[in-house]
Image: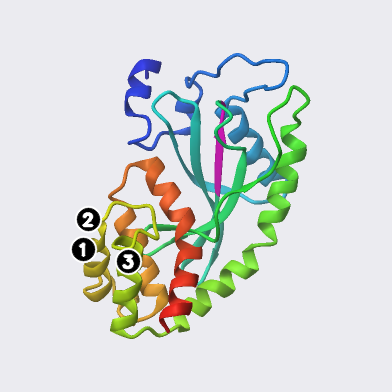
Amino acid sequence: MEQSQLLAHCGSSKITREELKVIPTPPGSPTHQPVPHYEIVGALVETLSFRQISVVREEYAVSGEGMKMFGVLDLETTFDGCRFSVGVRNSNDKSMRLALTVGYRVLVCDNMAFHGDFTPVLAKHTKHLSLVDILSVGVDRMQRSFEPMRRQVEAWRASQLSDEAAKLVIYRAFIEGELDVPKHLARVVHHRYFDPQYKEFAPRTLWSLSNAFTSAFKELDAIPQFRATAKLGAFLEGATAVSN
């Protein structure tokens, strides 16, 4: 795919790791050394493989000018109907730091969720940057989040919600603007929660509500979807603590 054709779809479409190869990397300076997105992803996959962690699926998105990249790598390891995932982000315009987060993919519906927001793994891009070293630290930190994330899913499945509490959470997310997502998705979340597509989400629980949100987020372009998903967990924890 030609670089110009690919960049025309960036931000709205998910792309492959191979397509990351043609994303341009800007020239560096004495204090800032941009790192090709493809190189970062390759080093991350290698770091995971050193720990016998296999990647079974990957998807990436870059901003229209190619400076920002978000990606999700689904891992072979599964738990309770979910598959562990790694979220990665990078920018070559100093707008955000290289960061990782741990997440999961819900197998029954392909919904994607993150355990928390992206956590930076280094202060800045410099000419002395060692990807292997910083990604090793990031992956070790991520592995320590596997068990807390599994416990969170269990707790959400057991967390019953009244209809009023669920409606209040949706109201706070969209009408009060506590989540930075388009307001028209409020109707989609409401429908997916109160008339679920899958029997697994029939119980009125925080787990079902979270999947109503992540299902609705699929209607967003790729980068907004990744960003909204990374913010969802903390929002739900806070909103339901107040609502219940």
Which residue appears at 43% of the width and 47% of the height?
226
What is the secondary structure assignment of the residue under circle 1? helix
Q: Could you tell me which quadrant the C terminus lies in?
A: bottom left
What is the secondary structure assignment of the residue under circle 3? helix
Residue for badge 3: 212
Q: Residues within 10 Å of mark 1 (few under 14, many from 20)?
A: few
As measured in the structure, the alpha-carbon distance from the residue carrying label 2 to the one carrying label 3 is: 14 Å
Q: Residues within 10 Å of mark 3 (few under 14, many from 20)?
A: many
Which label's residue is closer to the chain start, 3 or 1? 1
Q: Is residue 230 above or below residue 23?
A: below
As measured in the structure, the alpha-carbon distance from the residue carrying label 3 to the one carrying label 1 is: 11 Å
Q: Position of residue 79 (x, y in %)?
A: 54, 68
Q: Position of residue 155 (x, y in %)?
A: 52, 79
Residue for badge 1: 187
Which residue appears at 40% of the width and 34% of the height?
15
Which residue appears at 60% of the width and 13% of the height?
27
Which residue appears at 35% of the width and 58% of the height?
177
Query: Which amino acid, by three-letter code, is at mark 2?
Result: His
**36 sits left or right of 10 in the view:** right
Query: Which amino acid, by three-letter code, is at mark 1?
Result: Arg
Which label's residue is closer to the chain start, 2 or 3? 2
* Mark 2 and mark 1 residues within 8 Å of each other at the beta carbon: yes
Residue for badge 2: 184
- Magenta segment: does it hold 88? yes
